[in-house]
Amino acid sequence: MSGNTSKVKSVTASKPPYDVNHHLSKMSSTPQALFALLRDGIINLGDDVTERFLNQYIGYRRLKNFAEVVGLRGKLNVFIDGPVRDDHGICQDMSSIGHWGTGHLRATTASENDIEAVLPLAAQAYVLQE
């Protein structure tokens, strides 16, 4: 090694900016319409709800994530964080299965009725963060 000091360029990998259009482009028209309903319902839970766009999912958080949405071509997968009471039995336990998002319960939504069943679960998870 020579005694010369070589300059090393600092290379920073910048993440591409993800936004709602990044996720909508993965969905057909039905999941897009369902996402609009779900998004409105979750955002209206409180003034402290923030929406965070990541590559694979959209996170909804208060102090930390309480729900995540993965948009697919024909449906939405909604992951719920926290011990919520699933009266409709629509959630599947994902705690031992790899998945996008931080929630351990997954509800697959393909209709407005599914969205109506998921919103109370998101509300429960939101309240748990008080």
Image (cartoon, helix red, strand yellow):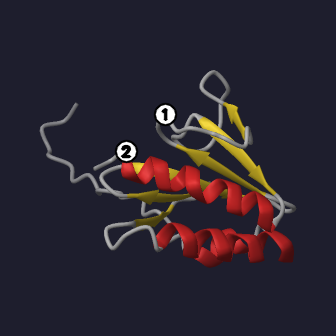
Amino acid on which the number 1 mark rests in the picture: Pro
User: On residue 83, which mark appears?
Assistant: 1
Q: Relative to 17, does residue 57 appear above or below in the rendering?
A: above
* 104 left or right, relative to 62: right
Q: Are marks 2 and 1 in contact (CB under 8 Å)?
A: yes
Tell me residue 61's x, y (percent): 40, 57
Tell me residue 49's x, y (percent): 38, 66
Local crowd at mark 1 within 10 Å, few (<14), some, or many (≥20)?
few
The residue under the point 77% across, 67% down is 26
Q: Relative to 95, does residue 27 appear above or below in the rendering?
A: below
Which residue corresponds to mark 2?
Answer: 128
User: On residue 28, which mark appears?
Assistant: none
Most extreme residue toward the top is: 96
Q: In this view of the protein, can residue 28 be seen by the observer?
A: no
Question: Label 1's element?
Answer: loop
Q: In this view of the protein, can residue 7 be seen by the observer?
A: yes
Report how many numbered discs are placed on residues in the image: 2
In the picture, residue 97 is in which quadrant?
top right
